[in-house]
Amino acid sequence: MPKIYSELASWYHLLTAPKDYADEAEFARNTIVEASASPVKTVLELGAGGGNNASHMKSAFTMTLTDLSPSMLDQSRRINPECDHIAGDMRTLRLGREFDAVFVHDALTYMITRDDVLQSMQTALVHCRPGGVALFMPDYVRETFVSGVHHGGHDGDGRSLRYFEWTYDPDPSDTTYTIDFVLLLREGNSPVRVEHDHHVNGLFSRRDWLDCLRETGFRSSRMIEDPYSREVFVATR
Ligand SMILES: C[S@@+](CC[C@H](N)C(=O)[O-])C[C@H]1O[C@@H](n2cnc3c(N)ncnc32)[C@H](O)[C@@H]1O
């Protein structure tokens, strides 16, 4: 488990702030509504993390937010107290109920084998009512992956975080890439603390995503581009 989702989870909203997710959340909300033949009221999110997307989507849907990390769910509860929060692995979660739609955003990138991807899709399928929609938004497909660096961060109440992020694929023949973060953590005027956080993420081709959706048993699936030209996948049960 990366540090930012466990021991450093209380810093998460200073790494990536809820307000920065407005465009992606609007895209997800519109895509789910447009893809569904009937009104969407209930949405299950797998890997909801700090609840940034949900903070924008909850005005349109009743959202159930799930994540592997109890510490991340605590962060989401702070900004989304009206949503249900449930700890669980998106590969094995079984809530025993169906939703109008299932949403999986960037947490999907922690599926690093084809089997992981299939399991997470199976979880989405069994929680999606017949005719319901599932939206899968990986950060990259193999065809569009580019190594790169980013930096950013935010100021909070007596705390500030700045980061440098290096995305890199050490072995283009396998299904993973890496992200290394250097996190600079400032509390009050104390000296800055520096943490290294290493993430291993999955990388699959467009064809793999569509094949996996079909193998899982979704009735139809297609690729569409999000506002940042990333390839994402919409499926119907
Ligand atoms: C980048 S964060 C998600 C942020 C989220 N998109 C938001 O709006 O705040 C990635 C999340 O994936 C979660 N995660 C990683 N592996 C998972 C798994 N197998 N099942 C469920 N959640 C997982 C992590 O705990 C982390 O909270």
Image: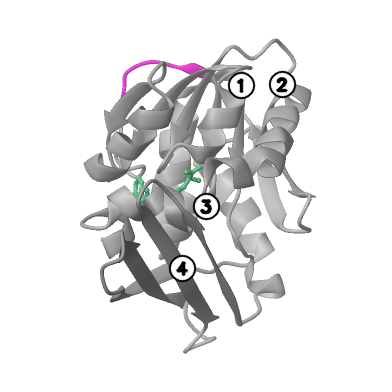
Give the mark nearer the N terminus: 4 vs 2: 2
Do callouts 4 and 2 mark residues in contact (Cβ within 8 Å)?
A: no
> What is the x, y in percent for residue 203?
53, 69
Q: Is mark 3 within 8 Å of ligand 1?
A: yes
Q: Which residue is mark 3?
A: 106
Amino acid under disc 2: Ser
Amino acid under disc 4: Arg
Give the mark nearer the N terminus: 1 vs 2: 2
Mark 1–mark 2 Cα distance, whole angstroms, equals 6 Å
Q: Residues within 10 Å of mark 2 (few under 14, many from 20)?
A: some
Q: Nearer the viewer, mark 1 or mark 3?
A: 3
Mark 4–mark 2 Cα distance, whole angstroms, equals 40 Å
Q: Which residue is mark 2?
A: 36
Amino acid under disc 3: Asp
> What is the x, y in percent for residue 83?
41, 19
Res. 121 in view: yes
Residue that appears at 23% across and 40% down: 70
Give the mark nearer the N terminus: 1 vs 3: 3
Q: Which residue is mark 1?
A: 132
